Image (cartoon, rainbow, N blue to C red):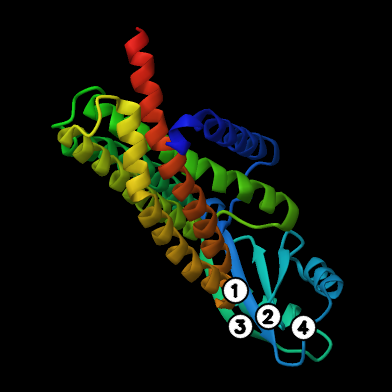
Amino acid sequence: MFIINHRKIFFLISIIAVALSIFSIGYFGLNLGIDFTGGSILEVSYADGRPETTSLRQALDQGGYPESSIQPAGTNSVIFRLRPINELEKSSLLKVVSLENKIAIEQRFSSIGPTVSSELAQKGIIALVIVSVLIVLFIALTFNGVSKPVSSWVYGLIAVLALLHDIIIPTGVFAVLGHLYGVEIDALFLTAVLTILGLSVNDTIVVFDRIRENLKNKISNDFATTVGISLEQTFVRSLNTSLTVLIVLVALYIFGGTTTKDFSLVLIIGTAVGAYSSLFIASPLLVTWEKWRRKI
């Protein structure tokens, strides 16, 4: 019953975190990658050690690529982000960034036009909306037999509210990281967000399902007590599951390649936040809703 009795404290923590995240998104903005803005990305490596960033910057400015960004990666690699270029321009760029007798060796190259990137952004938003609607419908139908004291639709709406909490906070963190370190929002970020939705709603449904069972078994006439007992019964299971996933993600972040670091970081933040919302936000919100309905 600790979580239920102190739910206002947990609500306050989440409200502060979400408010700061929304402020960060509005103030710093999102550093969108080429997947959403269009452009090219070229990763090169240098066998004899990469040149200084200032030398690369000067070479790009003189070579006709002044708008390019430079991001050191690993020990001897560099990632260049610039306007959309073709294969011929890529070959020219490789020569431009081969400095001080250090030959740039292509490791990765991709180019996306503005039309494709705009379409990807639209489809990403549509996917998030469809997922949210389907989650509400699924939970409402699954919990159709539970109508008292909280309607089955409320379970679905609260689950989606918790999911919004789980999306906003990682996005806010990446807004800050984008401002400070140039971390970008790309297609992998969207993939990570959709993965977070799946992991988080799974934990939430596990707790909700135990609440449904305990309501049917009438373990208590008090709804808050039923929810509290249900949380105690599922707390260790949910926590262990999240910790197991986090261990894998942290290992991926530490030992994985440059291209998966940001992806794994989103999942780490989202998994931690999702575990928190499933245990400390979603179920306590049911209690708050039930108490509010009784006062009407």
Q: Label 1 to label 4, Cα distance in Å? A: 22 Å
> Contact, CB < 8 Å: mark 1 with mark 4?
no
Using a 10 Å C-alpha cutoff, classify the residue at mark 4 as few (fewer than 14 neighbours), some (14 to 19) or many (20 or more): many
Tag 2: amino acid = Leu
Q: Which residue is mark 1?
A: 254
Q: Nearer the viewer, mark 2 or mark 1?
A: 1
Q: Going by the picture, which residue comes out furthest to the front?
A: 220
For the residues carrying marks 3 and 2, which lies nearer the camera in this image?
3
Q: Which of disc 3 and disc 1 is earlier in sequence? A: 3
Residue placed most toward the observer, 290 or 134: 290
Frontmost of labels 2 and 4 is 4
What mark, if any, has residue 106 been given in the picture?
3
Quarter of the image where one finds residue 64: bottom right
Labels 1, 4: front one: 1
Residue on which the image places disc 4:
50
In the picture, measured across the screen, residue 50 lies left or right of residue 118, that is: right
Name the residue nearer the viewer: 260 or 222: 222
Question: Mark 2 and mark 1: span between their CA atoms?
Answer: 29 Å
Looking at marks 2 and 4 on the same chain, the residue that comes earlier in the sequence is marked by: 4
Q: Position of residue 259 (x, y in %)?
A: 55, 71
Earlier-in-chain disc, 3 versus 2:
2
**Callout 4, which amino acid?**
Arg
Measure how far apart labels 1 and 3 are at the Cα level.
24 Å
Q: Earlier in the sequence, mark 2 or mark 1?
A: 2
Residues at marks 2 and 4 touching, judged by CB atoms closer than 8 Å: no
At 53% from the left and 73% from the top, the residue drawn is 251
Q: As rendered, which of 210 and 166 lies closer to the eye?
A: 210
